[in-house]
Image (spheres, helix red, strand yellow):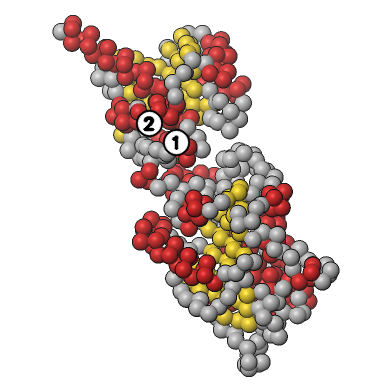
Amino acid sequence: MTKQEEKGEQTPCSFTDFALKVYPFLELTQFHASYYKVLEAFAQGRIQKLIVSVPPQHGKSVGATTLLPAYMLGLDPDTRIAIASYSGTLASKFNRRVQRIIDSREYKELFPETTIKQGTKPAAYIRTSDEVEIIGRKGELLSVGREGSLTGNRVDCFILDDLYKDAMEAQSPVVRGNCWEWYTSVVRTRMHNTSRELIVFTRWHEEDLIGTLMRSERCRMLNSWSDIDEVESGEWLYLNYEALKSSPATELDPRTEGEALWPEQQSVELLATKRNLDPVRFEAMYQGHPTAREGLLYSDKFREYDTLPRDIVQRGNYTDTADMGNDYLASICYAVDSDGVIYVTDVVYTQEAMEESERLVAEMLTRNDTRRSIVESNNGGRGFARAIQRLVPKVRVEWFHQSGNKEARILSNSATVLHLVRMPRGWHLRWPEFYAHLTTYKRLFRANRHDDAADAITGIVEREASTSSERRWQRVRFI
């Protein structure tokens, strides 16, 4: 609760109105309105421990590390705030920006009680690029780089903004370990019972500070505004904004599948290009779903081919229909050579409605001259198979019930998948979501958001590996 609320006074303005007043050039979208509303709840003391993951170049620091400290010092000039970043230079830059806002005419109109030293007066107060005190009050704003000291300073609110400079730092176990040591020995020791923490990051690694905290302390996903009032003492609220929406819509992020977070600045086409360059890093930095490469089941180890060999003995298709609303239909066409090597030739990987996915798969079967298609009959698969049979009567469509344990099947066949399956060169450009979900699939089964690509490719290997073995045995006996 702010000082104004304790005295029964009305808060001068919302955080969004404040931001537009002092930074009239801001372009605020639906995403920013949601983000700023969460930051306002934090400023008012309704949230004590908040983690927000935001993609690069989406206004993360402007909101959380420039505008928010100025707003909080306006609401309560007795608040002692510390800003921390990967370097003291960057943290000082944030501090200077906050000071310039407090110096502005627009700020003085909103918060006349919050003032800082001008020039050399008053002489008793501090104003440097790393520390500034509020005149006549207890409040101050400190800035510190990662691993810097805050000895003797009691802090009411910590704002930690990007404690890792880049991927090289985040990938270093030494840097991550030092960051965690600094956080526990410096940040946590400067806090008291009612201190607040805001951690706002672009994710780089699953064992970064956010990942470590989420494994060691209680966290609640912030999906609805009611979560703010229902959070328990000592529990973190965690909010992740994906650059391209891939998770179910929520009250705070109601976008539909595939929508960009800030399309005016980072369009779907631009983000798709970035994802194609490095799907694993894109999942971390832009989607907030980091994966340690050493924990991946397949990684990018699939061998690629340029043209199909001449000794193709069979063409087939395997389709796994979507089980739930957030799942993908995975339909894969492939060719098998005389040695049993499997060449993926085409893929439909989609969350489209059944009517549209039926059309896409039927067109793919025709395009690839497929004569036999296997469809898992679980969860509507039989109806899908019948629809495909009607659309492409020349294809023999069969269905079966998959009773095997999915986790056991995927894990136990992973080595065979990498040994037998070949992907066409450039497949990451042709089927970027299929590529991303397959190459970022984790060995820890429950850590995966999507298993549809891995399940389908496993189904092909289960079918064809045994058939190819029989084929080779028959050839040996014939010889």
**Amino acid type assigned to the residue bearing label 1 in the image:** Phe
Q: Identify the residue at image location x=45%, y=39%.
A: 436
Residue 164, placed above or below residue 293 = below
Q: Is residue 15 left or right of residue 148?
A: right
Neighbours of disc 1 within 10 Å: few (<14), some (14-19), many (20+): some
Where is residue 385? Give x, y as percent.
53, 14
- Circle 2: element type: helix
Residue 308, placed above or below residue 299 = above
How far apart are the two marked residues, 1 and 2, measured between alpha carbons?
A: 9 Å
Neighbours of disc 2 within 10 Å: few (<14), some (14-19), many (20+): some
Depth check, front residue: 327 or 282:
327
Which residue is most to the top? 478
**Amino acid type assigned to the residue bearing label 2 in the image:** Leu
Q: Is residue 75 left or right of residue 340?
A: right
Q: Say whether marks 1 and 2 touch (CB < 8 Å).
A: yes
Which residue matches tag 1? Answer: 445
Which residue matches tag 2? Answer: 411
Where is residue 363? Give x, y as percent.
51, 20
Q: Is residue 325 left or right of residue 300?
A: right
Q: Quadrant of the N terminus?
A: bottom right
Q: How many marks?
A: 2
- Circle 1: element type: helix
Depth check, front residue: 29 or 121:
121
Q: Identify the residue at image location x=48%, y=37%.
A: 446
Where is residue 394? Give x, y as percent.
48, 8
